[in-house]
Amino acid sequence: MYYAVIMAGGSGTRLWPLSRRYYPKQALKLVGERTMFQYAVERIRPIFPPERIVVVTLAKHTPILMEQVPELPRENFILEPEGRGTAPAIGLAAIHLIKQDPDARMVILTADHFIKETKRFCEVLTAAEKVADGRLVTLGIKPSTPSTGFGYIHQGALAGEENGFPFYVVERFTEKPDLATARKMVDSGEYSWNSGMFVWQAKRILNEFKLQMPDFYAHLMEVKAALETPEYGNVIDRVWPQVRKETIDYGIMEGASDVIVIPVDICWTDIGSWGSLLDLLPEDANGNVFVGPHIEIDTKKTMVFGDKRLVAVMGVQDLVIVDTEDVVMVCSRSREQDVKALVELLKQTQQESLI
């Protein structure tokens, strides 16, 4: 059967101080009336019933997520003792699925994406399941700008079409390019943004782990052998800290063969920073975005994200201002990608209660 795996274990440090260690961005209402996790589940419900939606997260996040989407079965939450990157999270989900369904196919999704064209998104997920017959399928996003914030996928020869979606052989994955290179890529029409969404058979991705990440595969097999036994908790707690941190892109996709990309336009945004929210929230005539009580005079291209207190701004430009109960953060819009450096500084100065 076809299962959805939602990765929901990130801490979202670039959205600090709103996103915190025990209340991460996926649990927040950043756009509209629902949390990012609620949106992630809601948009796939037309094709995935609750029993076929699996969530990989950390134990400390589980109560919040369970409360937000109570219809998901408790046993569908797969817990990592600690975050080790997307590759280990996907491997952990794969061994759980293949235990109950040796022929399981899985789509890898994350809880921090915002997608407006949900109907088309479900259509492409249905098509991708059929394409993923022994192949690794990635969803590429048709680029709207020469962004330097995303990785790119170079599409080669046309490999076929499924349900109106053409799909292509992947030539290579390219990490975040400089602006001149990004412009050339977009102008060529041969590149997609790397969305981080994938579809494959569970047994195929496990074989790739065996070939490309053999040390991790050995750890994974230890955990798999303990599934559904009283020793499972002890085994994963012992093994997981030994697992090397790795992304699925570096660990598997860049070295894999028979990889397919399906380019799509689904009005997709990866909400990874305050700047990405600026693309989704409505602006006023001066390019400002205000959330929460505020007053302003002569303010331009500034984002204010507040809650209870009034935030007053005057004579400023190109700022991000975030007001929470215990922290006020002010930074230049040109530095919003670097907010996680503030989190690291708090760790160094032993102020971890604020993160």
Image (cartoon, helix red, strand yellow):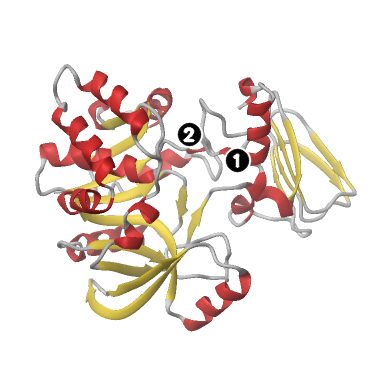
- The residue sitting at 31% across, 61% down in the picture is 255
Asked whether, in this view, residue 152 is left or right of residue 71, the answer is right
Asked whether, in this view, residue 50 is left or right of residue 189, the answer is left
Instruction: Please name the amino acid that badge 1 sits on.
Output: Leu
Between residue 292 and residue 40, name the one nearer to us: 40
- The residue sitting at 24% across, 78% down in the picture is 159
Quadrant assignment for the C terminus: top right
Picture quadrant of residue 168: bottom left
- The residue sitting at 43% across, 70% down in the picture is 192
Depth check, mark 2 against mark 1: the one in front is 1
Note whether 170 is above or below 80 in the view shown. Answer: below
Between residue 19 and residue 91, name the one nearer to us: 91
Residue 166 at x, y percent in the picture: 29, 76
Instruction: Please name the amino acid that badge 2 sits on.
Output: Ala
Q: Does dot 1 land on a helix, a strand or a loop?
A: helix
Residue receiving disc 1 = 15
Residue 30 at x, y percent in the picture: 56, 42
Determine whether label 2 and label 1 are within 8 Å by CB: no
Residue 279, visible in the rendered structure: yes
Between residue 213 and residue 26, name the one nearer to us: 213
Residue receiving disc 2 = 27
- The residue sitting at 17% across, 63% down in the picture is 130
